[in-house]
Image (cartoon, rainbow, N blue to C red):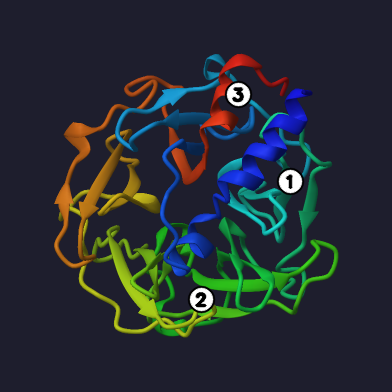
Amino acid sequence: MHKTLLLATALALAGVQNLVSAEAAGASTPDDTCYLFTYFTRNGEDGLHLAWSRDGYKWEALNGGQSCLTPTVGTAKLMRDPCVTRGPDGTFHMVWTCGWWENGIGHASTKDFIHWSAQQEIPVMASEPAVRNSWAPEIVYDAKRGEFLIFWASTIPGKFPETAGSSESELNHRIYCTTTKDFITFTPTRLFYDPGFSVIDATILPANGRFYLIVKDETVNPPKKHLRIASSDDLAGPYVDLGPPFTPAGLWVEGPTAIRIGGEYLVYCEAYMKKHYRAMRSRDLKTWEDVTDKMIFPNEGTPGRMKHGTVIAVPGEMVERLRAEPAAP
């Protein structure tokens, strides 16, 4: 049987959902599941990188550590902060930061992480001519509404004056969002989350029938730069009850991504000032343990080290194909 047909069959039989829909439905993880990490290196100029793991602790770069997809959209043509989710038809959709000072984000889709659709730039903040940026987009599938939710951080000059100047370069972020069913039409951009401080790098972790929004407090004066968690009964929000920081004090981190593996919740993040990846572990989302010393990440301590990405569960067959068939960027 042709490899593509085998892969499609495996995907259908495995029934591996993206982390939002699977956790929300209380689905168990199939025995042949592996974990895929999408990330970028350096400034994101060479595109998408992939790593894989069987247990969420030992990560190995795929494609010989080379890029799997070259960016073609955006003024700067970067592919930073790649976030992936799986739709109900088995297609994986990826969004990313396509430049430092853009009003749009990048999008492309794939069935296997080898063959990709044409890249598109989604002008998510085109309605705000003065917007400074569109950073770290995330995408999740909202099974309740049958649509994709995309959210990101932007600074709109003049808004939220109470926290003006609290981040570097006069940035003052809030989280905005849009939704789509087909990646052709999008709902009007709206404010998604305002915690009362400059906030970036939001990601959603479903657990215990609820949704947990993990965010970075981007305040630099006084220094915060830590991760906190709010929650909601609905994927679309509102998110409330923001908890205290759960990452180590004084350690500036960003780019959280989270997943449940067995009875553990793992949150990976980048300690960008120290130039290495970290991980926190919890069983109840209240008590956290730093498990960085138990992790193995590819290319740590080199210019090609991992930066801000997303972890997802995928069928083991998909990883085996990726290991055997290098992608052409």
Mark 1 or mark 2: whose residue is earlier in sequence: 1
Q: CA distance from mark 2 to mark 3?
A: 31 Å
- The percent position of residue 247, horizontal first and vertical second, equals 21, 55
Is residue 268 at least partly visible in the picture?
A: yes
Residue 95 percent across, percent down from the top left: 65, 51
Horizontal side of residue 61 vs 263, given as left or right: right
Type of amino acid under label 2: Leu
Q: Residue at x 69, y 39 (%)?
A: 9
Q: CA distance from mark 3 to mark 1?
A: 16 Å
- Tell which of 275 and 283 is nearer to you: 283
Residue at x 79% of width, y 44% of height: 119
In this picture, is 191 found above or below 206? below
User: Which mark is on residue 109?
Assistant: 1
Helix, strand, or loop for circle 2?
A: loop
SS of the residue at dot 1?
A: strand
In percent of width and height, residue 246 lies at 20, 61
Report which residue position mark 2 lands on.
Answer: 235
Q: Nearer the viewer, residue 121 or 156?
A: 121
Point 51% across, 76% down: residue: 235
Q: How crowded is the residue under tag 3: few (<14 C-alpha within 10 Å), some, or many (20+)? A: some
Residue 35 found in image quarter: top left
Return the residue at label 3.
322
